[in-house]
Image: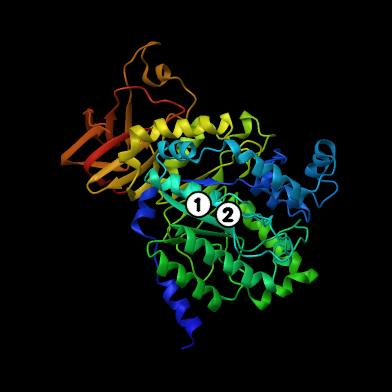
C-alpha cells in the first residue's frame, strides 16, 4: 500500500484524548492586524447572513477579521467605514500599528484571566486569512516578504498559558491566504475559488511543521480547508501526532480535490451557494462538512441538538465577531444568562465551548465588555466545576422540569448533576408563592429522574437538599430560589432514569 494511503488509515484511527473531552471550556484568541481598524457590521449574525443566499453576502460579514476581504466590495459597510475613517490606507500598514501596540502587552495577565474562567486550553490564531504571522517565521513569503511579527507572540503566550496549567493550541488558516490569492469572497462558492495553490502548498506545510516543531501545540486548529490532497495531508498530520501524541486536530482539514475546479463554473457555483444557504438556515450557524481525517467537530455559532458520536466543540465569539469589533455594543454581546447556559448546554451534550476573545490591536488589551464576561465564567465555574469539568453526558442530556423549566444533565460515576434555570420571566416570589423579599426556596420536579434506596440530593458544595419521589418524578426542594441569569446545579447521587 502506498505510504500516503497507509498514513490516511493511521490518522483516521486517532481519537480525541481524555484531556480534551474533560476540558468543556477553551479560549480562542483572534488578534490580527484587522484588530486595529476593528470594524464589521453588527446588524446580522453569520448564520442569517449565509442563509440569504446573496452572492455578495460575505462582504457584509459580521466577523471583523474579514475586514480586508470586505474592503474589496466598494459598497460594503467596511469599505465606507475605511474611506471615512482611514482614508483609503493600505490594509497591510495596520500590521505595523498592531506590532507597535505590543509594547504594553502582558501575556501573563491574559493567561491568568483565562485560567480563572476554568478554561483548560487556549487556542491562538497564529495566521489568519490576511497571511500575517504572529511569530518570527523562517518561512519566506514570496509575495509579501517580512509580513510577520518580529516578536514571538505565539511562543510568549504558549509559555504563559502553560505556566498556568492550561494546554496551548494554534489556529492556522490553511484554506485561505490573501497574500497568495486575493480573490474577493462574496458567496460560499467563492471560498473554493479563493483557495491558493501552486507554491502555497509547500509554504503552508512548512509553516505548520514550523509551528509543530517550535511550540508542540496540543491543538492543531486549521480553518476552511487544506491545499494538498488527502495522502499528502495525512503525512503531515501523522508527523504532528508523532510529536504530540495526545494532540487534537479539528475538522477543517478538508483536503484539496481536483473536483474543486468545478466550483469555477457558473452552474456548480449556484448549486453550492443554494446548498450552503439551506444548511445555514437549518443549522442557524455554520457546520463544516466532515473531512476524511479529524478528531473533533467544530460547529460555528450553533450547537448540536443532542449528543454526538464524534467529539465536538461549539466555537463562537463573545459577540457576533471573532476579532475585536468596536461597533459592538452591549446588545451584541452574550448576556450573562445566555453565556452560562451555553456552557452548560454544550457540556451536557458532550461538547466543549471554545469561546473567542478578540483583543484590541492598538494596545494589546482586552476590552471591558469581554473581560466582564470572562469574570462571569470565573464566578460560575468556581462554584460548579464538579458538575462541569470531566463529566460525561447522562442518558438524557436535556429535558424540562414539571413546570417547564429547562434542565441540562451531566454525569460523573454514580452522580448526575441537574442544571436548572428560571426561564418563565416570573420573579422568585411568583414562582414559589412566598412574599417578596423572602429567602425561602422553591421545588423543582425532574420527570426524567427516579430515586433508589441509596439516593441522596445535595448542592454542588455538598449541602443536603430535601427530596421526594413523586408520581411526576423526583421532587427536589432548593435552598434558594432559582435565578434567571445563572443556572443552578443540584447533585443527584445514586438515581436512575425514569422510563418515558
Q: Indicate which disc residue 155 carries.
A: 1
**Residue 467 horizontal/vertical position (percent):** 23, 31
481 over 91 or under it: above or below? above
**Residue 412 horizontal/vertical position (percent):** 27, 47
Q: Is residue 211 left or right of residue 188?
A: left
Q: Is residue 209 left or right of residue 177?
A: left
Near mark 2 (Cα within 10 A), the count class, few <14, some 14-19 or many ≥20, is some
Residue at image coords 59%, 41%: 358
Near mark 1 (Cα within 10 A), the count class, few <14, some 14-19 or many ≥20, is some
Q: Which residue is mark 2?
A: 135
Q: Is residue 4 left or right of residue 390?
A: right
Residue at image coords 50%, 81%: 4
> Is the image coloured rainbow, by chain, by secondary structure, or in one colour?
rainbow
153 over 227 or under it: above or below? above
Quote the CA–CA distance across marks 2 and 1.
7 Å
Residue found at the very far bottom of the displayed protein? 1
**Residue 477 horizontal/vertical position (percent):** 28, 26
Amino acid at each position: 500500500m502506498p505510504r500516503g494511503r497507509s498514513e490516511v488509515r493511521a490518522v483516521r484511527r486517532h481519537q480525541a484524548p481524555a484531556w480534551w473531552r474533560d476540558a468543556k471550556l477553551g479560549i480562542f484568541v483572534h488578534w490580527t492586524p484587522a484588530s486595529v481598524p476593528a470594524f464589521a457590521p453588527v446588524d446580522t449574525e453569520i448564520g442569517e447572513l449565509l442563509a440569504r443566499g446573496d452572492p455578495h453576502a460575505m462582504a457584509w460579514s459580521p466577523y471583523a477579521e474579514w475586514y480586508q476581504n470586505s474592503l474589496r466590495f466598494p459598497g460594503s459597510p467596511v469599505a465606507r467605514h475605511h474611506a471615512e475613517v482611514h482614508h483609503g490606507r493600505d490594509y497591510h500598514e495596520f500590521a505595523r500599528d498592531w506590532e507597535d501596540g505590543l509594547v504594553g502587552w502582558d501575556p501573563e495577565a491574559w493567561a491568568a484571566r483565562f485560567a480563572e474562567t476554568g478554561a483548560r486550553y487556549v487556542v491562538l490564531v497564529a495566521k489568519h486569512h490576511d497571511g500575517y504571522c504572529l511569530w518570527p517565521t523562517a518561512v519566506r513569503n514570496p509575495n509579501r516578504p517580512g509580513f510577520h511579527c518580529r516578536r514571538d507572540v505565539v511562543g510568549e503566550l504558549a509559555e504563559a498559558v502553560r505556566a498556568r496549567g492550561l494546554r496551548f493550541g494554534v489556529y492556522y488558516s490553511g484554506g485561505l491566504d490573501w497574500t497568495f490569492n486575493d480573490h474577493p469572497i462574496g458567496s460560499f462558492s467563492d471560498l473554493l475559488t479563493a483557495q491558493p495553490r501552486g507554491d502555497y502548498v509547500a509554504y503552508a506545510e512548512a509553516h505548520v511543521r514550523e509551528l509543530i516543531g517550535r511550540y508542540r501545540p496540543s491543538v492543531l486548529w486549521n480553518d476552511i480547508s487544506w491545499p494538498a490532497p488527502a495522502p499528502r495531508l495525512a503525512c503531515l498530520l501523522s508527523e504532528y501526532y508523532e510529536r504530540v501524541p495526545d494532540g487534537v486536530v479539528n475538522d477543517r482539514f478538508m483536503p484539496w480535490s481536483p473536483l474543486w475546479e468545478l466550483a469555477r463554473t457558473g452552474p456548480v457555483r449556484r448549486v453550492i451557494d443554494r446548498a450552503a444557504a439551506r444548511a445555514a438556515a437549518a443549522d442557524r450557524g455554520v457546520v463544516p462538512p466532515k473531512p476524511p481525517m479529524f478528531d473533533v467537530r467544530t460547529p460555528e455559532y450553533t450547537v448540536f441538538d443532542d449528543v454526538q458520536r464524534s467529539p465536538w466543540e461549539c466555537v463562537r465569539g463573545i459577540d457576533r465577531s471573532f476579532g475585536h469589533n468596536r461597533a459592538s455594543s452591549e446588545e451584541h454581546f452574550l448576556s450573562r444568562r445566555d453565556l452560562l447556559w451555553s456552557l452548560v448546554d454544550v457540556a451536557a451534550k458532550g461538547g466543549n465551548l471554545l469561546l473567542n476573545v478578540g483583543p484590541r490591536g492598538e494596545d494589546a488589551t482586552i476590552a471591558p465588555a469581554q473581560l466582564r464576561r470572562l469574570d462571569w465564567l470565573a464566578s460560575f465555574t468556581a462554584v460548579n466545576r464538579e458538575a462541569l469539568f470531566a463529566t460525561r453526558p447522562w442518558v438524557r442530556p436535556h429535558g424540562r422540569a414539571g413546570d417547564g423549566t429547562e434542565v441540562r444533565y451531566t454525569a460523573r460515576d454514580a452522580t448526575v448533576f441537574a442544571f436548572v434555570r428560571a426561564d418563565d420571566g416570573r420573579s422568585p416570589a411568583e414562582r414559589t408563592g412566598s412574599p417578596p423579599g423572602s429567602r425561602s426556596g422553591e421545588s423543582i420536579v425532574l420527570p426524567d429522574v427516579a430515586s433508589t434506596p441509596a439516593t441522596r440530593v445535595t448542592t454542588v458544595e455538598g449541602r443536603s437538599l430535601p427530596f421526594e419521589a413523586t408520581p411526576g418524578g423526583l421532587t427536589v426542594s432548593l435552598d434558594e430560589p432559582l435565578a434567571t441569569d445563572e443556572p443552578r446545579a443540584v447533585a443527584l447521587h445514586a438515581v436512575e432514569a425514569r422510563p418515558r
